[in-house]
Image: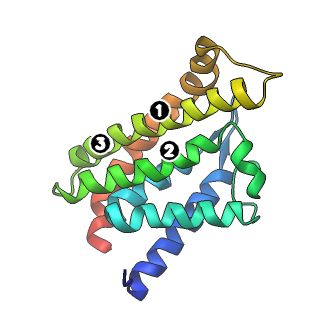
């Protein structure tokens, strides 16, 4: 795959934005980060090919030891229960990009592309969290009810709001890029 300098720069830029999004934390009982906003925006603006590439660069950088994840970085991070959300980001960005490429840029099309990726990201993230907590970290298992209450409900509203914010800026940014 041949990649232009412009697309390399955009992928690097979105990888950096996702890393910054991991550090932008809105306090609460469960701190909320802005990663999903930038993941969704990468899919919308870079498409199904380069959006996931920007997420993959972010994940590889974190696994290589750069402290870009919310809790740092390093290869050991695959054993963190939240690592599944990072895998979910990869799938979500692809899905968002795929849907966005088939529609004309608008608020509605951005939401139509974002909501399926929201569900894919949470499906992968919650599944991974459950598996790690119940089969790897056997000293602290989690029930399905507790998983929904602690890992979905506190974050879902913020992520839905980030989808709306993303849809608002998408059409304007699409014209620039």
Q: CA distance from mark 3 to mark 2?
A: 18 Å
Q: Nearer the viewer, residue 99 or 2?
A: 2
Q: Percent x, y for residue 103? A: 16, 54
Residue carrying label 1 = 123
Lower position in the chain sequence, tag 2 or tag 1: 2
Quarter of the C terminus within the rendering = bottom left
Instruction: Give the number of marks.
Output: 3
Task: Find numbered disc 2 in the image and state the secondary structure of the residue it sits on.
Answer: helix
Mark 2, residue position: 88
Question: In the figure, is residue 90 to the left or right of 74?
Answer: left
Query: Is residue 66 placed above or below 87 in the rendered structure?
Result: below
Label 1, residues with CA under 10 Å away: few <14, some 14-19, many ≥20 = some
- Asked whether the residues under the numbered discs 2 and 1 touch, taking CB atoms below 8 Å apart as contact, a structural biologist would say yes
Q: Is residue 72 visible?
A: no
- The disc placed on residue 111 is 3
Say left or right for 136 vs 111.
Answer: right
Q: Residue at x 47, y 32 (%)?
A: 123
Q: Earlier in the sequence, mark 3 or mark 2?
A: 2
């Amino acid at each position: 795959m041949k990649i232009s300098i412009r697309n390399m720069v955009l992928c690097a830029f979105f990888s950096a934005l996702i890393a910054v999004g991991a550090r932008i934390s809105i306090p609460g009982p469960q701190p909320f980060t802005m990663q999903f906003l930038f993941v969704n925006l990468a899919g919308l603006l870079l498409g199904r090919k380069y959006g996931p590439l920007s997420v993959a660069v972010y994940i590889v950088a974190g696994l290589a030891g750069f402290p870009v994840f919310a809790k740092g970085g390093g290869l050991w991070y695959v054993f963190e229960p939240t690592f599944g959300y990072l895998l979910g980001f990869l799938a979500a960005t692809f899905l968002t990009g795929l849907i966005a490429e088939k529609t004309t840029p608008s608020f509605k099309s951005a939401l139509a592309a974002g909501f399926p990726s929201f569900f894919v990201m949470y499906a992968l993230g919650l599944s991974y969290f459950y598996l790690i907590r119940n089969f790897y970290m056997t000293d602290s298992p989690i029930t399905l009810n507790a998983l929904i209450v602690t890992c979905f409900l506190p974050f879902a509203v913020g992520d839905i709001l980030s989808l709306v914010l993303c849809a608002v800026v998408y059409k304007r940014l699409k014209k620039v890029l």
